[in-house]
């Protein structure tokens, strides 16, 4: 472990609390990852979860993950984010689902929750940069239901599983989504009390990050607490062990791009001029082509 932090919480524009998971880490050490937010598991009354109103993007890949969404009285048909883009294409994001949103040259979209919904929500949003030559590619959005994401059972007793959101050859399992322009892994480790696992990321994925969302695991020899972020070194293998209680953590690994990054809100380009152009295209209705 190169560095361990407890990231801050803040209010997002929609009026909900997020944990800014990678806050305080130099951007060059996070390459190719740009942002990682957690909506901590919390109970929402009717109308309290506004979702994300219509907003634009350009120049990266967005990867939302609905870790948990369950109604106050148990699972219901309202446990869903309703997504819609600028062309009125619609999709549903249910508990456990993952989205690979290569926004490329630009899109506008929203993700809303029925105002009558009430219950528990735990959600993550993560952004991956795109190389310069692919920032203006046509948008490509892939929605993957939880049932189509492989979950590997590393051990049955104690139960240890890995849900493969992104990546290939993880204990023989591969995500149905391929991050073709930026090789990356995005994995959800769930470890029962007393369980442990060893994971060996591909050598080309030099940037390795982890976030503890449950329990008090030992990660690469470092005792950790829920809500801690870890910047990991480039070792051959990662060892994770749960203590007396179950543990859960998300793991990211990616191949560095090594290009300049200029970001202004939802626009991520290589130069200030490109960002100004993105803002102008948005203001004049040309962002999405």
Image (cartoon, helix red, strand yellow):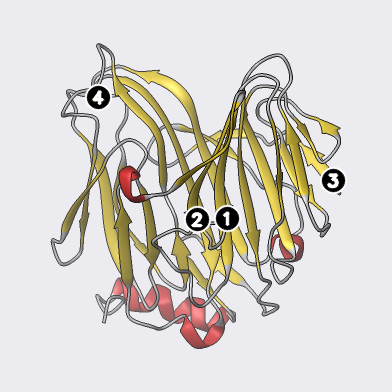
Q: Which residue is mark 4?
A: 47
Disc nearest the viewer among 3 and 4: 3
Marking on residue 170: 1
Separation (CA) of disc 1 from disc 4: 39 Å
Query: Which quadrant of the figure has residue 270?
Result: bottom right
Circle 4 — which element? Answer: loop
Disc nearest the viewer among 1 and 3: 1
Residue found at the very far left of the displayed protein? 88
Separation (CA) of disc 1 from disc 3: 21 Å
Q: Are marks 2 and 3 in contact (CB under 8 Å)?
A: no
Q: Which residue is mark 3?
A: 1
Circle 1 — which element? Answer: loop
Separation (CA) of disc 3 from disc 4: 41 Å
Separation (CA) of disc 2 from disc 3: 26 Å
Depth order, front residue of 162/47 = 162
Disc nearest the viewer among 4 and 2: 2
Q: Earlier in the sequence, mark 4 or mark 2?
A: 4
Separation (CA) of disc 4 from disc 2: 39 Å
Q: Look at the image and tell me in which quarter the N terminus lies.
A: top right
Identity of the residue drawn at 31% across and 65% down: 141
Q: Earlier in the sequence, mark 1 or mark 4?
A: 4
Q: Earlier in the sequence, mark 1 or mark 3?
A: 3
Q: Are marks 1 and 4 in contact (CB under 8 Å)?
A: no
Q: Which residue is mark 2?
A: 173
Query: Which quadrant of the figure has residue 226?
Result: top right
């Amino acid at each position: 472990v190169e560095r361990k932090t407890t990231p801050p919480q803040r209010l997002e524009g929609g009026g909900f609390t997020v944990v800014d998971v990678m806050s305080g880490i130099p951007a060059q050490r996070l390459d190719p990852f740009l942002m990682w937010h957690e909506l901590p598991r919390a109970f929402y009354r009717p109308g309290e979860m506004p979702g994300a109103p219509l907003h634009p993007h350009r120049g990266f890949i967005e990867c939302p993950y609905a870790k948990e969404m369950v109604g106050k009285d148990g699972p219901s048909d309202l446990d869903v984010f309703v997504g819609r883009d600028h062309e009125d294409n619609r999709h549903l994001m249910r508990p456990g689902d993952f989205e690979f949103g290569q926004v490329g040259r630009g899109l506008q979209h929203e993700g809303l929750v029925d105002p009558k919904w009430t219950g528990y929500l735990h959600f993550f949003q993560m952004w991956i940069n795109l190389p310069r030559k692919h920032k203006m590619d046509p948008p490509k959005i892939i929605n993957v239901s939880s049932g189509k994401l492989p979950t590997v059972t590393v051990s049955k007793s104690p139960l240890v599983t890995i849900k493969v959101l992104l990546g290939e050859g993880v204990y023989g399992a591969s995500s149905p989504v391929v991050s073709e322009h930026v090789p990356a892994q995005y994995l959800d480790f769930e470890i029962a009390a007393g369980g442990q696992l060893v994971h060996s990321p591909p050598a080309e994925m030099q940037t390795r990050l982890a976030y503890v969302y449950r329990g008090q695991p030992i990660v690469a020899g470092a005792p950790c607490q829920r809500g801690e972020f870890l910047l990991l070194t480039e070792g051959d293998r990662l060892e994770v062990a749960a203590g007396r209680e179950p543990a859960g953590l998300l793991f990211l690994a990616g191949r560095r791009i090594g290009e300049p990054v200029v970001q202004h809100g939802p626009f991520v380009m290589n130069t200030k001029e490109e960002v100004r152009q993105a803002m102008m295209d948005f203001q004049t209705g040309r962002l999405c082509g």
